[in-house]
Image (cartoon, helix red, strand yellow):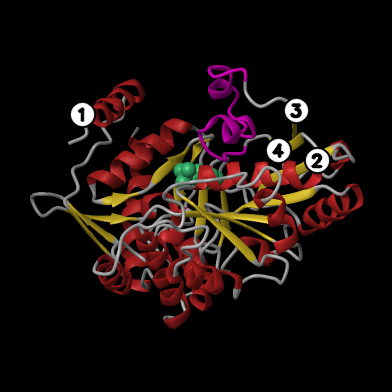
Amino acid sequence: MNFSHSVFLKNIAQTTGNPFLIDIERAEGLYLYGPEGQRYMDLISGVGVSNIGHRHPSVISAIKEQLDKHMHVMVYGEFVQSSPNELAEKLVSHLPDNLSCCYFTNSGTEANEGALKLAKRYTGRTEIIACRGAYHGSSHGSLSVSGNEVKKSAFRPLLPDVRFITFNNIEDLSLITTKTACVIMETIQGDAGVRIPSQNYMKALREKCNKTGTLLIFDEIQTGIGRTGKMFAFEHFDVVPDILTSAKALGGGLPIGTFISSYEIMQSLTHSPMLGHITTFGGNPVCCTAALATLKVIEDENLLSKVEDKGLLFEQLMQHKRVKDIRRKGLLFAFEFETSEEVAFIVQECLENSVICFWFLSCPNSFRIAPPINITEDEIKEACKIIINAMDKLDNL
Ligand code: PMP
């Protein structure tokens, strides 16, 4: 066991008063299994990682096949390999024409770092605009454009020249000017509690960026790879970003991220200075192979077409007098309650009944559900019954 990591988690558990530590030995599809055979329904998919379930057999066999070939050789430069190339081709086949070039990274955080650097290089500008309530990662750059003021204040100085606007507020778009290199934004804010922007806002945002020559970055690390019923959530809005970032579910359980843009924009990171972003393991063939297999599973099993119906079923079965609001796109949910205590109780009560749901980093009075998109109707019914039972017990609090 990784000692420092487990101590870190125990500290969190003690500070929050939540004994949320379970031992997991094995994972399969929707389920996690403990060492004594306990079975848990994982309704958060590792916070949106296992969109096609844990250890999907097609992903596992693709990984095994790749392991028998090679694990890591130099990816960029003259040794271009088939797995990152095939993955890039598959990804861009799901994207509009301007999103044609992928740079693979090790994580979502690194994808956002690359995207911010790319925007600065391409525009020659330094100002970055981000949204209050955003989560883009934990490194200095990605933390600088995130909204958590408490966390940020612990690590100052951060990136200079970052300004914040309120998500989904059209008036604030006036802060975007010809000095702005980029606006970075989650298409739907995840950790802020599933905040869905209006069509009008997205249209006005795109127009303002066009007018000022500002690059628009959509962070789809949590919302992409089928989570909302489209391969990427921006497809719900009639707006295309200049740079798209993806990670989490992309690797089907292995770590990989990417930032994607046009050939023209991407060139500015490869020249002057040469190799403006380098990473040893980014584009690792095993991770790329897992990601390619993940995308194929989504296509072959026609998973996107069923997401909305499953989302609606959840929504219908989760009606309860304690639920103040349900925010949902596809199978990405926030259930809002009056207080954070109710949420903590439900999360704990569900865990005791072998269902894993979770809270949000920046929205403590809502709880999060993001199940695998191949969850079945019967599984949804079973899960909702347990969660509703937990909500019923709130009256005894
Ligand atoms: N952006 C968003 C929207 C995220 O949800 C996350 C992870 N929670 C990240 C970036 C960071 O990704 P990673 O943890 O892979 O670095």
- The image quadrant of residue 273 is top right
- Residue 357 coordinates in the image, percent (x, y): 37, 48
Q: Is residue 142 magenta?
A: yes
The amino acid pointed to by label 3 is Asp
Which numbered disc, 3 or 1, marks the residue that appears first in the sequence?
Answer: 1
* Residue position marked by numbered label 2 in the rendering: 124
* Residue position marked by numbered label 4 in the rendering: 130
Q: CA distance from mark 3 to mark 1?
A: 38 Å
Q: CA distance from mark 4 to mark 2?
A: 18 Å
* Residue position marked by numbered label 3 in the rendering: 161
Could you tell me which residue is drawn at 38 percent across and 73 percent down?
377
Which region shows up in magenta?
134-157
Which numbered disc, 4 or 1, marks the residue that appears first in the sequence?
Answer: 1
- Asked whether residue 194 appears in the rendered view, the answer is yes
- Asked whether residue 336 appears in the rendered view, the answer is no
Q: Secondary structure at mark 3?
A: loop
Q: Residue furthest front?
A: 78
Q: Secondary structure at mark 1?
A: helix
The amino acid pointed to by label 4 is Ala
- Would you place residue 37 above or below residue 378 in this image? above
Q: CA distance from mark 4 to mark 1?
A: 36 Å
Q: Nearer the viewer, residue 96 or 36?
A: 96
Q: Nearer the viewer, residue 230 or 184?
A: 184
Q: CA distance from mark 2 to mark 1?
A: 44 Å
* Residue position marked by numbered label 1 in the rendering: 3
